[in-house]
Image: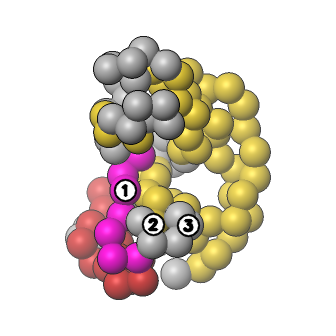
Amino acid sequence: MDKKRLPISRCNSNCPKCQMPTEFLMFESGPGGDFSTYIGQRTGSIYRLDLGKIYYLKLKLETLILPAIEGEGNLIKIPEEIKCKICGTTYKAEQIMVGGEEHIEAFEL
């Protein structure tokens, strides 16, 4: 795993239970690349998975994320597992609003 300074989007989504917005960081997919975003449960580190490795190189997802799981114990997949900062509900963000971009230190899988 390589740690790099990468661009990431500041996003938010409303919790389906309390309707309050929750902010989170997520690597966006679009022209030029598709990415999955994971957060390490133990350290809170952010991981970016290049889905091209699965689609074009035919590598297995389990193989690519294994080094992160070994260090973290578990990975949280964004936006499928957003935790509301108000009521604590974990939900899949269906509607995501992008509020800007920043650069962070993240691991590439």
Label 3, secondary structure: give it. Answer: loop
Instruction: Say which residue label 1 marks.
Output: 76
Could you tell which of marks 2 and 1 lies nearer the N-terminus?
Answer: 2
Q: For mark 1, does the 10 Å Cα neighbourhood hold few (<14), some (14 to 19), or many (20 or more) residues?
A: some
Residue 45 in picture, x, y percent from top left: 55, 67
Q: Are marks 3 and 2 in contact (CB under 8 Å)?
A: yes
Q: Nearer the viewer, residue 28 or 19?
A: 19
Is 93 positioned to the left or the right of 20 in the image? left
Between discs 1 and 3, the one toward the N terminus: 3
Looking at the image, do the residues carrying marks 2 and 1 touch, with CB atoms under 8 Å apart? yes
Quarter of the image holding residue 40?
bottom left
Which class describes the residues within 10 Å of circle 2: few (<14), some (14-19), or many (20+)?
A: some
Does 99 appear above or below 62?
A: above
- Position of residue 29 measured from the top left corner of the image (x, y, whole percent): 49, 40
Q: Identify the image quadrant of residue 107.
A: bottom right
Disc 2: which residue = 40
Asked if residue 49 lies in the magenta stretch, the reply is no
Which three-letter amino acid code belongs to the residue tagged 1? Ile
Q: Earlier in the sequence, mark 3 or mark 2?
A: 2
Q: Is label 2 in a helix, a strand or a loop? A: strand
- Please name the residue shown 45% across and 72% down the image: 42
The residue under label 3 is: 45
Left or right: residue 68 versus residue 24 is: left
